[in-house]
Amino acid sequence: MVFLVFPSMTWAQVPIEPLRRPEEGPGAYTWRVGLGYTPAGQEGLGVDGLGRPYAYTRFTQEWRLTLSGTVSLGSWLKAGLELADITTTVEEARSYPFGEERTTSVHRAFAYSASYEWRLDPKSPWDPRVSLSFGHPWQAGITASASLLRDPVVLVGEVGLRSQAEEPQGWLSLALGAGFVANAWISLSTSASWAIPMDGVGVPATTLGLRVRYGLDPEGKKEVGVRVALSVRGERTWLALEVEAAGRGP
């Protein structure tokens, strides 16, 4: 999914400064802490290990704590790292002809990913970039992106290829995003992404996202935000919510 970053603006009682790209000189950094929640449900029919048919209702809750950051190694190169602690709770009610059975299970996983991003032409109005990423559980990808700033709107486009441990191993992703600065305190961004399998058999996925950002300081270096994402994959549809705090420096 495409996420948009808005630069600092003056909060004093004067007109908002023109929108501009954030400085990315050597030593510039960003950080982000996010807490996400994704509920999902499913109903259907099944057969247990003893051959007994049953109808089931399954409720899944996923909590994701994410810590991430980037640092600029120069005006053209940026490195990033993301850590995620994921806890998933699955509750299931099975209805048999003779009664009902309920089960609960909790799964916990840890994931990380590292990335490098090259800024190909900082002076270009399109600001083209290429990034490489890899992580655990095994995944790797390459992404090309470009953005266009037309105050007070930012447009972003992205195309990428990624490989992962699950089948199919090859995916093509396309994404578009748009951001709008409402005032010196609040900005909005929307995104749409589409992933299709390129190697093997898989179910395409579509995600629509909305983010609301609220600045916390006059320099625009700290902010809080809320993200909502609606995802559709085959017959499955789910909604994810995330609250976050982010900042940049120096």
Image (cartoon, rainbow, N blue to C red):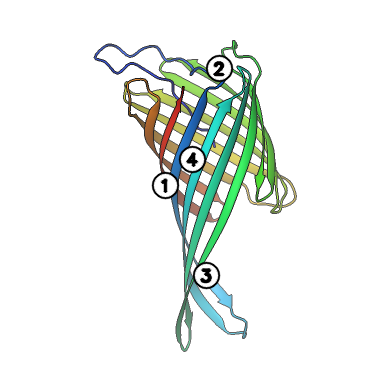
Sequence order check: which comes first, mark 1 or mark 2?
2
The reply to whether the C-beta atoms of the residues labelled 1 and 4 are less than 8 Å apart is: no
Q: Secondary structure at mark 3?
A: strand
Q: Identify the residue at the far right of this view.
A: 199
| Type of amino acid under label 1 | Leu
Residue 232 image point, x, y percent: 53, 49
Report the residue marked by disc 3: 44
Q: Secondary structure at mark 4?
A: strand
Relative to 22, residue 175 above or below: below
| Type of amino acid under label 2 | Gly
Relative to 22, residue 239 above or below: below
Residue 18 image point, x, y percent: 39, 12
Q: Which mark is residue 208?
A: 4
Relative to 152, residue 239 above or below: below
Q: Image quadrant of residue 156?
A: top right
Q: Is residue 199 left or right of residue 183?
A: right
Residue 84 image point, x, y percent: 53, 48
Q: CA distance from mark 1 to mark 3?
A: 26 Å
Report the residue marked by disc 1: 241
Q: Nearer the viewer, mark 1 or mark 4?
A: 1
Report the residue marked by disc 2: 25
The reply to whether the C-beta atoms of the residues labelled 4 and 3 are less than 8 Å apart is: no
